[in-house]
Amino acid sequence: MKRLAAALLLACLATPAQASMWINCSDAGGEASFDYLIGTVPALSIVALTVSVGELVWASDVAYGPGEPIAVGQAFEDEQMILIDALDPAMTERLASLRLFKAAEGDAPMVYAGTLHIPGHGAWAVSCAEG
């Protein structure tokens, strides 16, 4: 029984990593970026994120890169758009907002485009690719 429970636990832990994928968003000039890792549950599940502008970098965990700490705030997705806010670790201040429209045709990869706003630093038109 213990072996079965352990096997089920390992299977559950391994499953999200198999289908997780990064969405990499940046402006045309490469000045700012917002990258997020989505999980495998049916709803939008942000597992990790990194944000950068110029020389400044934020990361939700050191495993995903160097930088100041950042946390996932609100996240929403429907058939047409994705909205994600990144907050400071205390969840009191918005550090970045990503607003995307998305479209797909047939078997082609999803296309994402929208805006990235990093308060105090600027706003950019961004496009995204599945990474």
Image: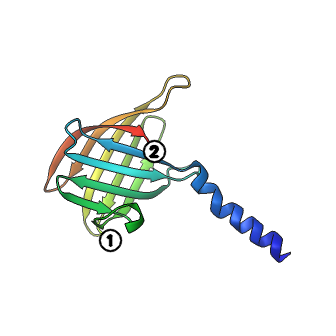
Which kind of residue does numbered mark 1 sit on?
A: Pro
Residue 92 vs residue 68, the one in the foreground: 68
Which kind of residue does numbered mark 2 sit on?
A: Glu
Measuring from the top left, give residue 85's x and y in whole percent.
33, 55
Is 63 displayed left or right of 34 in the figure? right
Measuring from the top left, give residue 43's x and y in whole percent.
54, 50
Q: Residue at x 32, y 71 (%)?
A: 89
Q: Between tags 1 and 2, which lies in front? A: 1
In the displayed structure, 59 sits above or below 31; it is below
Local packing at callout 2 (Cα closer than 10 Å; few below 14, some 14-19, many 20+) is some
Q: Residue at x 45, y 45 (%)?
A: 77
Residue that carries the numbered disc 1 in the rendered image: 89
Disc 1 from disc 2: Cα separation: 23 Å
Residue that carries the numbered disc 2 in the rendered image: 77
Toward the right, the furthest residue is 1
Q: Can you tell which quarter of the image residue 102 is in?
A: top left
In the displayed structure, 70 sits above or below 115; it is below
Is 112 displayed left or right of 43 in the figure? left
Q: Secondary structure at mark 2?
A: strand
Q: Residue at x 22, y 47 (%)?
A: 32
In the displayed structure, 16 sits above or below 9; it is above
Residue 63 vs residue 59, the one in the foreground: 63
Measuring from the top left, give residue 71's x and y in whole percent.
36, 65
